[in-house]
Each structure stands twice: as structure tokens, then as C-alpha cells.
Image (cartoon, helix red, strand yellow):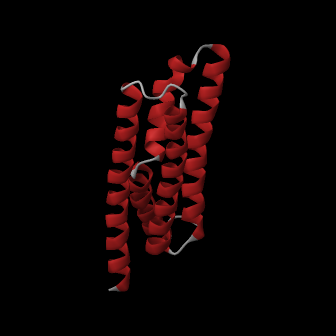
Amino acid sequence: MKKKLLISGLIILTVALGFLREYIFETLNHIIEAGADAGGNFSLLKWVFTFVFSILYLILTGCFLQLLFHSGKYIRLAIFVYAVLFGVSFLVLSAGYVFTSFNNVYAFTRTVMGIAQSPIVLIILIPACFLNEVIRRSGNVNN
């Protein structure tokens, strides 16, 4: 019963985090579009919030995986996936800045970081980990 309550709480927290993220970014976008971002502080704040929400979703993903599977290997997998998302985004952004322009790579980087600051990784990892557990327990794979 306790596990079900924790899972329910994590689901509610995940949904609430999504709404909070959307509200913050919509507000920042309205401020920027209204021309009130002369110093670029609100644009910089969007990058800070992107990082913060990505880390929060990583933590939630780790909580779900620990609660469901009680295995550090899946948490390490989640950390690896997020590191790849951050790494790809950073490399593409850096290459775009050096070789072309920020505007040429922004859409791709925004998409990659959009994955990191959403429950998409969680939605993919939970079934993948369940499948791995089923295969491992059936004796077909030595882990």
C-alpha cells in the first residue's frame, strides 16, 4: 500500500512539475515578446530554468526507478541518458556557435533539452527496465 501511495504521489508531482514548468516558461516568453528583456536577463533565466527542470525530472526519474526496481543500475542508466541529452545539446550548441550561428542550431538544441525537461525519459525507461527485468528473470540473459 505504501508503494502505491508513493507512486501516486510521484505521478502527481510529475504532472504538477510539468504545469509549473509550462507556467514559468510561458510567463518568461510573454515578458520577452513584450520587449521587456533589454538586458537579456529573462532569456538567460530561461536557460537556468531549463537546467533546473531537467535536473528535477532526472531526480523524479531516479525516484520512480528506485521505487519500482530497487536497483542502482537503472538510476545510473537514467543519469547516463540525461548526460547524453546534455552532452548532445552542448556539443551541437557549441558547434553551431563556432561554425554557423546560434539560430541555426537552436531548434535542435531546444528539442533535445525539451526531452530532458519532460517525463519522456521516464516514460521510455520504465517499460524498458520492466522488459529487462522480465528477460533477466526468465534466465535468457545473464546480468
- Residue at image point 48% right, 27% down: 108
> With 4 as the anchor, is 142 left or right in this view?
right
Q: Is residue 128 above or below residue 92?
A: below
Residue 89 in view here: yes
Quarter the N terminus occupies: bottom left
Q: Is residue 7 above or below residue 23?
A: below
Task: Find residue 120 and report its horizontal and vertical position in percent.
Answer: 40, 49
> With 31 as the anchor, is 141 left or right in this view?
right
Task: Find residue 19 and report its horizontal and vertical position in percent.
Answer: 32, 52
- Residue at image point 34% right, 46% down: 23
Residue farthest to the top, as pictured: 100
Residue nearer the viewer, 57 or 133 = 57
Task: Find residue 115 and report its horizontal and vertical position in percent.
Answer: 44, 43
- Residue at image point 42% right, 56% down: 122
The quarter holding residue 77 reads bottom right
Q: Is residue 101 above or below residue 80?
A: above
- Residue at image point 53% right, 50% down: 52
